[in-house]
Image: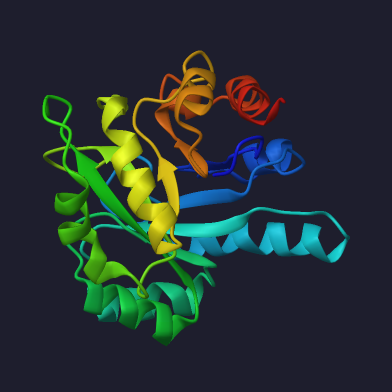
Amino acid sequence: MTVGTIPTVKICGLQSVEVLKSIVHLPIAHIGFVFAPSKRQVTPEKAAELIAFMKAEQAKGQTVPQSVGVFVNPTKEQLIGILAVAPLDIVQLHSQETPTFCGWVREHFHVQVFKSVSISKTEDAIPSLSKVAEQLNPYIGHVDAILLDTFDPIYGGGSGRTFAWDCIPVYQEWARTSGIQLLVAGGLRHDNVDQLVHAYAPDGVDVSSGVETDGVKDIAKITAFVERVTRK
């Protein structure tokens, strides 16, 4: 992200049309629907309902977020079935998906692809640029963004915990050189996201549990989070 540019905001794990109605007017770039096993998992039919609402608002002239489906090691058959019901704009792949698989998703469905990179919370050493390039260069031309998230041993991400942010610059250098967007997730809240934005200037930020109260999306917390990210 260039200096002075405002990061995009992704609100992940949405399940309620009522919540969506209350936040669709905010400057949110992406709404994430979780199809992987999770307490925030939605059915293709529920995602389709939420997407239909956004398309109806768009038809009225409202700028609306893009829809993102979050998957963990899906099969091609699973993706074909889900996207036939829920017409997603972006597919986010959150596990060990190969560059070839990412490229197939991008070409078959004509969608953008976000690929997560899990960072261990206890990881001490900052990887070298050459190591990051070795890991991620095969994805160039197959993905539109990489998403740094805290590693979760069960779900891969979505842990609600931060990772060591001092590793961000090396991934950011790789992303800028490669022409790929860099998004950051993992334990973000309204009271720490401005620190991340000012120190590291990612292209986008992704939040889920950090805008919830008792496991339910909290409109006030979402509003506060968006305001912190988008204020100049």
Residue placed farthest to the bottom in the image? Answer: 108
In the rendering, at what x and y percent does residue 153 appear? Answer: 11, 39
Q: Is residue 4 above or below residue 219?
A: below
Left or right position of 73 against 204 = left
Query: Measuring 58% from the left and 21% from the top, which residue is drawn there?
Result: 221
Q: Colour mode?
A: rainbow
In the rendering, at what x and y percent does residue 65 appear? Answer: 65, 53
Residue placed farthest to the right in the image? Answer: 60
Q: Is residue 217 above or below residue 25?
A: above
Q: Is residue 217 above or below residue 100?
A: above
Query: Measuring 66% from the left and 35% from the top, which residue is drawn there?
Result: 4
Query: Measuring 25% from the left and 65% from the top, which residue is drawn there?
Result: 137
Name the residue nearer the viewer: 211 or 217: 211
Q: In what quadrant of the picture does the C terminus appear?
A: top right
Q: In what quadrant of the picture does the N terminus appear?
A: top right
Name the residue nearer the viewer: 12 or 98: 98
Residue placed farthest to the top in the image? Answer: 191
The image quadrant that residue 142 belongs to is bottom left
- Does residue 122 appear in this view? yes
- Does residue 46 appear in this view? no
Name the residue nearer the viewer: 160 or 45: 160
In the rendering, at what x and y percent does residue 150 appear? Answer: 25, 34
In the rendering, at what x and y percent does residue 99 appear? Answer: 24, 72
The image quadrant that residue 156 belongs to is top left
Query: Measuring 70% from the left and 57% from the top, which residue is drawn there?
Result: 54
Name the residue nearer the viewer: 36 or 181: 181
Left or right position of 59 against 230 = right
